Amino acid sequence: MQIIPLSEGVFTIDKSKIFVPFDLNKDDLQQRNTGSLLVEVQPFVVITNKDVLLLDTGLGFMQNGQMQLHKNLVEKNIKPESVTKVLLSHLHKDHAGGVSYKDKLGHYHLSFPNAVYYVQQSEFDFAMNTGFPSFMTEEISILDHNSQVVFLNEPEGTIDGYIHYKITGAHSPHHQVLWIKENDEIIFFGADDAPQLQQMKHRFVAKYDFDGKKAMELRRQWWNEGSKEGWAFLFYHDVKTPFCKNC
């Protein structure tokens, strides 16, 4: 399997939940608001024998009339039309901002016309009921009653025989993680349950998690299991290490 990170840049975020661009060469984290976190925003493409998978969709920023996510894909020689499955860990705006785009008439369209989108029904319901600032309901409402969308109604299961999902309820109440298994390879995507390499290596309870203690224990469990089985770990918010194996 081929792993392709699609970095949308480095940002700081504080309790306002606003993502502010950060230049690693010029900006000083100490000059940002107290409690600001430094994060990458980084969807992934995983190319398998069956699919071109997109794991989460970034912030959905536009650049000169083009979605940044589309631009990043094209720069990696991947046409947006070639994406076959979009797998959503959860619907926070930094993970689901690129689910759709708005045309000049103000109408929303799914960003990947030939893809099947997979999302937990409970996560969608929670997002629509909760709304701003964590969820952009106007952007994700297009998922509802859409023929390209498969709503998952089980806490654990398998997609197409080789993608395993499981709700953890750690970072957020209905957050899910993913294992992609093909031949002898296993790719693990923990999204915001396991966002950075250092959080895997050290015991750390994050105040921004729904259940920080559970997230910490799950990270330890996954790290131990994945180290033994040779998983490739994808880190959505890691500034230095987008993914690693045997690290």
Image (tube, helix red, strand yellow):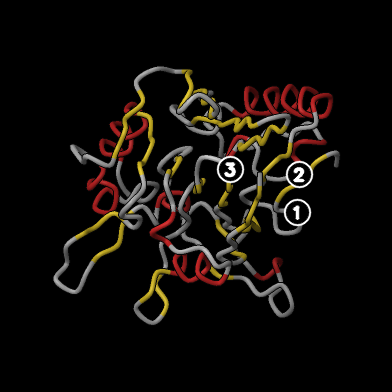
Q: Considering only order in the chain, which callout, 2 or 3, is on the residue closer to the N terminus?
A: 3
Residue on which disc 1 sits: 241
At which x and y percent is residue 139? 28, 53
- Asked if one can make out residue 214 in the rendered structure from this viewpoint, the answer is yes
Q: State the CA–CA distance, disc 1 to disc 2.
A: 7 Å
Q: How many marks?
A: 3
Residue linked to disc 2: 197
Residue behind mark 3: 48
Q: Residue at x 22, y 69 (%)?
A: 103
Could you tell me the amino acid type at mark 1?
Thr
Can residue 207 be spotted in the picture?
Answer: no
Q: Nearer the viewer, mark 3 or mark 2?
A: 3
Q: Farthest residue in the left direction?
A: 105
Helix, strand or loop under label 1: loop
- Classify 10 as above or below 45: below
Q: Position of residue 239 (x, y in %)?
A: 70, 58
Residue 159: x and y, percent?
A: 46, 27
